[in-house]
Image (cartoon, grey):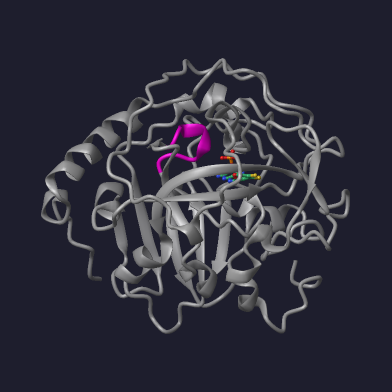
Amino acid sequence: MSRIPNLPEREVTPESTFLRRRELLRGAAVLGAAAALPGCAEAESSGPATPASGGPEALPPVAAASAASELGEIRPAPREFRTEEAQTSWEDATSYNNFYEFGTDKRDPARRAGSLRTRPWSVSIEGEVARPGPVPIEDLMAPHPLEERIYRLRCVEAWSMVIPWVGIPLGALLSRFEPTSKAKYVAFETLVDPEQMPGQRRSILDWPYREGLRMDEAMHPLTILAVGMYGRVLPNQNGAPLRLVVPWKYGFKSIKSIVTIRLQADPPPTSWSLQAPSEYGFYANVNPDVSHPRWSQARERRIGEWSKRPTLPFNGYAEEVASLYRGMDLRKHF
Ligand code: MTE
């Protein structure tokens, strides 16, 4: 098995960026929850997409650190990768979260995710690649310049945000590991550690949280792995140190705190389609014409606003991605 060599970052990164990346790493270790932030907007009143499992367990709140490090040099988002719509406030984006590993209440991740240790962090690259193996996150990121992407995020629960992410194209990263011709899908898994992730002490989901993409979706230029947002290191509650962002799909595809990336021939099982196959499919493309069995997907509430707005096909990215699904019945492949 060949392995990605552990190149020192300074061999592949300009010194100034290298130094700021070091700040990034230090920052991430202490950046916990941005706690005690003002309350956020209500979720869609027709209820969350979640199993009614008796409410959040009374877990001790984790002491929240709140340093917000800068990420350093970031390529600004080119026109095709930015929406000009008003950005969601940092406070809302970091205090109104879904991260069931820390509980099912929207405020649980901000209160509790400080217990997640994001360094050292290693991602296991597995399956149909010429160069599999565990890769420290520093080595994973080192060759890739950080880019800003200002995307809409549409949750399946009918709320949405606009977030300036900082990350790298997933396609560029996967290419480095040389996918074989058998690689048709990419599977992702979140860390399992009930000590750091107290929500995992309950079987709300079949842990680890799992997600997957078809290879062409994974290689699409809109698909990124984020390490930051708003020019800062990704807060734990938003999926530090590494999360997926696929802007034309419902937010549950954007898996947080990734420890495994596996390329494979078959479609991987995904957490929500395992949990409720009639409610959540593998594709999860934002589609105002296909209602969730328990509520309409035609409209959404932008967090921070009161009135609802129409939901756009593929979350407004149809021009870029609709061709990926040509000929498919999107009611069947929801
Ligand atoms: N990833 C993991 N590991 N666990 C989760 O519970 N929730 C998903 C997704 N990624 C989730 C996850 C859902 S349902 C949504 S809408 C988004 O994260 C929310 O991202 P945000 O909290 O940063 O807005």
Residue 223 visible in the current orientation? no
Give how far across and how far down residue 215 sits, in percent. 50, 73
Is 223 one of the magenta-colored residues? Answer: no
Relative to 115, say whether 2 is above or below. Answer: below
Give how far across and how far down residue 154 sits, in percent. 67, 49
Give how far across and how far down residue 143 sits, in percent. 24, 58
Left or right of 316? Residue 164 is left
Residue at image x 54%, y 42%? 163
Residue at image x 24%, y 40%? 21
Quarter containing ligand 1? top right
Main secondary structure type of the part rendered in magenta: loop
Residue 151 visible in the current orientation? yes
Is 235 one of the magenta-colored residues? Answer: yes
Q: Which residues are magenta?
A: 234-241
Q: Quadrant of the C terminus?
A: bottom right
Quadrant of the rendered image containing residue 54: top right
Give how far across and how far down residue 145 sits, in percent. 29, 54
